[in-house]
Amino acid sequence: MAERSLRGKVTVIGGGGKNLGGLLSTTFADEGAKVVVHYNSDSSAAEAEKTVNAVREAGSEAISVQGDLTQVSEVRRLFDTAVDTFGGVDVAVNTTGMVLRKPILETSEEEFDRMFAINAKAAYFFIQEAGRRLNDDGKIISLGTSLLAAFTDGYSTYAGGKAPLEHFTRAAAKEFADRRISVNVVAPGPMDTPFFYPQETPERVEFHKSQGMGNQLTHIEDIVPVIRFLATEGWWFTGQTMFPNGGYTTR
Ligand SMILES: NC(=O)c1ccc[n+]([C@@H]2O[C@H](COP(=O)([O-])OP(=O)(O)OC[C@H]3O[C@@H](n4cnc5c(N)ncnc54)[C@H](OP(=O)(O)O)[C@@H]3O)[C@@H](O)[C@H]2O)c1
């Protein structure tokens, strides 16, 4: 039986330099994983380097790789770099995403294309490349949103852009099953990171809080253990969407 731990495992974390991805990188490193920390914007480079240093201080190995994952060639370069550096990949987590809260009647073609490029296209080719490059018994985890289980306005291109992830994941789970590669979506509730606030009013933040247990938002510390579980003892989950959200939405 394959070892169900992260010790010595090579992990690629899309968006792994900060926020949820940053905490994942350092948590995986604490458990002995080698980490490829991906980041996108120049403005994220410093945080990515800080995360790489934190992994090294934890006694593990890490590199950072910059890339716009809406370009398929960049997704491939990310995995090529991981394989060239560490000899293979065992776990691939894609935390990248982009949010927009806008009525359908005001959404431009350019906004639609950008939202689907990062939330759907990049996610698809991340799964494809992970499926090509992962070792047997690998794990692929993508970040969705609890809005996948909501009935609400304003998030047509965000929830709509993340929705295909579930079908990409189900198909990949079947197609990669002969190599025991599990593929899942983790769909958090509204998370207390800088990603969440710009499109919300203070009143809406209070409403989002009121929908979670104990009147609180989701914290990255609540999500990392779920992803860690899927990457280790939770390997028997595949093709699923999990909603860690304190009761915010369900289906
Ligand atoms: N915060 C929430 O309320 C919430 C709730 C549910 C689900 N989620 C999901 O959880 C994930 C992590 O979110 P977070 O809160 O930790 O915020 P975050 O750190 O801002 O995560 C988004 C990541 O996507 C990256 N990204 C954007 N465009 C990209 C591109 N073209 N190519 C590659 N990477 C790109 C960003 O990189 P740069 O900043 O370097 O461009 C960033 O690292 C996201 O998928 C999000 O949709 C968030």
Image (tube, rainbow, N blue to C red):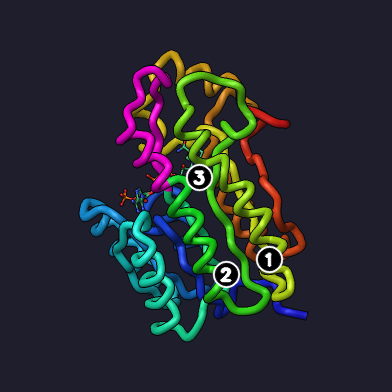
Is 229 displayed left or right of 42 in the figure? Answer: right
Whether 72 is among the magenta residues is: no
Q: Residue at x 39, y 39 (%)?
A: 115
Q: Is residue 63 above or below residue 148?
A: below
Asked if the residues shown at circle 1 and circle 2 are in contact, with their CB atoms under 8 angstroms apart, the answer is yes
Label at residue 220: 3
Quadrant of the snapshot with the N terminus: bottom right
Judging from the image, what secondary structure is the residue with disc 2 in? helix
Q: Which residue is at the far front?
A: 109
The quadrant in which residue 247 appears is: top right
Front label number (1 vs 2): 1
Q: Callout 2, which amino acid? A: Gly
Image location (x, y in percent) of residue 100: 38, 31
Is 155 displayed left or right of 91 in the figure? Answer: left
Q: CA distance from mark 1 to mark 2?
A: 9 Å
Crowding at dot 1, Cα within 10 Å, few <14 / some 14-19 / many 20+, comes out as some
Whether 115 is among the magenta residues is: yes
Q: Residue at x 40, y 77 (%)?
A: 80
Ligand 1 within 8 Å, label 2 CB: no
Ligand 1 within 8 Å, label 3 CB: yes
Image location (x, y in percent) of residue 89: 52, 76
Front label number (1 vs 3): 1
Crowding at dot 3, Cα within 10 Å, few <14 / some 14-19 / many 20+, comes out as some
Q: Which residue is mark 1?
A: 175
Quadrant of the snapshot with the C terminus: top right
The quadrant in which residue 209 appears is: top right
Q: Which residue is mark 2?
A: 131
Q: Earlier in the sequence, mark 1 or mark 2?
A: 2
Q: Is residue 63 above or below residue 165?
A: below
- Residue interval drawn in magenta: 97-118
Image location (x, y in percent) of residue 172: 64, 61
Q: Residue at x 21, y 55 (%)?
A: 42
